[in-house]
Image (tube, rainbow, N blue to C red):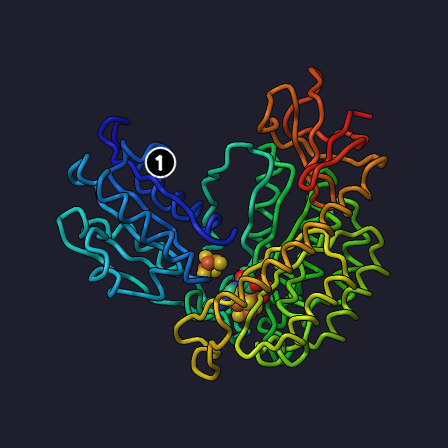
Amino acid sequence: MLKEKERKKFFIESYGCQMNFSDSEIVASIMTKEGYGVTKNENEADFIFLNTCSIREKAEQTVRNRLTNLKHSKTKKKGVKVGVLGCMAERLKSTLLEQEKLVDLVVGPDAYRDIPNLLEDVSQGRKAVNVLLSREETYADISPVRMNQDGVTAFVSIMRGCDNMCSFCVVPFTRGRERSRDPQTIVSECQDLFKKGYREVTLLGQNVDSYRWNVTSKGVLKNPEQPAVNFAQLLDMVAKVDQKLRVRFSTSHPKDMSDEVLHTMAAHQNICKYIHLPVQSGNSNVLKKMNRGYSREWYLNRINAIRTILPGCAISTDIITGFCGETPLEHADTISLMQEVKYDFAYMFYYSERPKTLAERKFEDDIPLEIKKKRLQEVIDLQMQHSYTSNQKMVGHTFEVLIEGFSKRSDDFFFGRNSQNAVVVFPKQASLKIGDYVKVKVDDCTKATLIGKIA
Ligand code: SAH
Ligand code: SF4
Ligand code: F3S
């Protein structure tokens, strides 16, 4: 191993979804194993990596703007090399090198093990690209280098890719085929995190409900000596790591979310009572065009199952406004569905056409931007009311909160979340530290935060 001073350093920045943040930790692990040092200061880096997102036009624009402003810091320190990783790398491949002259390295999500080799080329002044997708790669054996500072919450990838082909979505093209990770490696990673003081894991996949180990899509065991593992069973295994380890997961898919998963959640107090169940649209015709695999009725049936099996469980969603051909009446169905479900939280977007997707090939992106934005604003305004009501309902109640850090406003306050994923802020107490559980009585709230006192 080289002396600290001689080690080349890398700086990595993540855009997009939690999977990308999780992947950056895998990249950091691969790099540190090769003797490179991680730095949080881009000015002292020899390599700058951007782990990018392609989900909407805007996400890519953000990265391009960042590359433009990097040109300056690149001239500041001669010789610094820039790598684009992740979904934009996969989507644009080597054309990215032509479009963005300062990029030296382009690596897709399944090729991170190759980065050290590619960097040898790059260090000699050549450009390097590896965007091969894999049917097997899950980085199962790599223990990620944790980048977030709190040391309490961690992401754990349980699968990669996506086979769903929702017509608006670029992910199947940037992340490749769906594959699940060996459950034993998931459980050992969680055990290890717990030993290191972590108290919450979030299991990640684009559709966690289709997690499947040792069994083909036709239900045949791959290795007859061993049992198959589905998502409900994996959740059960992870929940048993320790009572004091909170378990969260994302994302659930309405077409696949089973009652078995809900019953497993009910059976373990440490599986958090919060489900992110993206609906996208409240209209069955639009859902069909989106190729989501469920109708409005099916979705509402799943909401009902959550309410029945897990009373008090929080529910959040994703919504897209102005999808191809969406009529005012179809949009009104999204509003009425929101009124029916009353989500605790939502991520809301207007439709952004993505190259190569089914929607781009089959439908016209015919809703004017103005209308897309107007519909989006309507959805946001309604959600703001619902989020506020959801917070107000928690006032007067006492929750178990995992302390995650100090409040942004003041070091005299801790912040954490309850099982329902609501952020709770409360005055600090000397006997308590980050990573402890504490009962907090909520006595006030804002639109985004619950405010309370230790009970
Ligand atoms: N696998 C998750 C979604 C991951 S992408 C699921 O199926 O629910 C996160 C969210 O981005 C999606 O739920 C969708 O609401 C939004 N999104 C994806 N593609 C989009 C596009 N082309 N335009 C606008 N929003 C999009
Ligand atoms: Fe995209 Fe659909 Fe897969 Fe989610 S389930 S990542 S929206 S294709
Ligand atoms: Fe973006 Fe890729 Fe995630 S497109 S949302 S970073 S899977």
Q: Nearer the viewer, residue 367 or 61?
A: 367
Residue 139, above or below 428 = below
Which residue occupies 29% across, 62% down?
130
Which residue occupies 57% across, 55% down?
204
Residue at mark 1? 38
User: Is 369 left, or right, of 118 in this rendering?
Assistant: right
**Is there any visible trace of residue 273 in the rendered image?**
yes
Which residue occupies 79% across, 45% down?
269
For label 1, the SS is strand
Give the image quarter of residue 280. Answer: bottom right
Residue 317, above or below 50 = below
Q: Position of residue 271 (x, y in %)?
A: 73, 48
Residue farthest to the left? 125
Residue 356, above or below 406 = below
Q: What amino acid is labelled 1 in the image?
A: Val
Q: Position of residue 221 (x, y in %)?
A: 62, 74
- Badge 1 crowding class, 10 Å Cα cut-off, few under 14, some 14 to 19, many 20 or more, is many
Q: Position of residue 292 (x, y in %)?
A: 61, 75
Ligand 2: which quarter? Answer: bottom right
Q: Nearer the viewer, residue 377 or 143?
A: 377
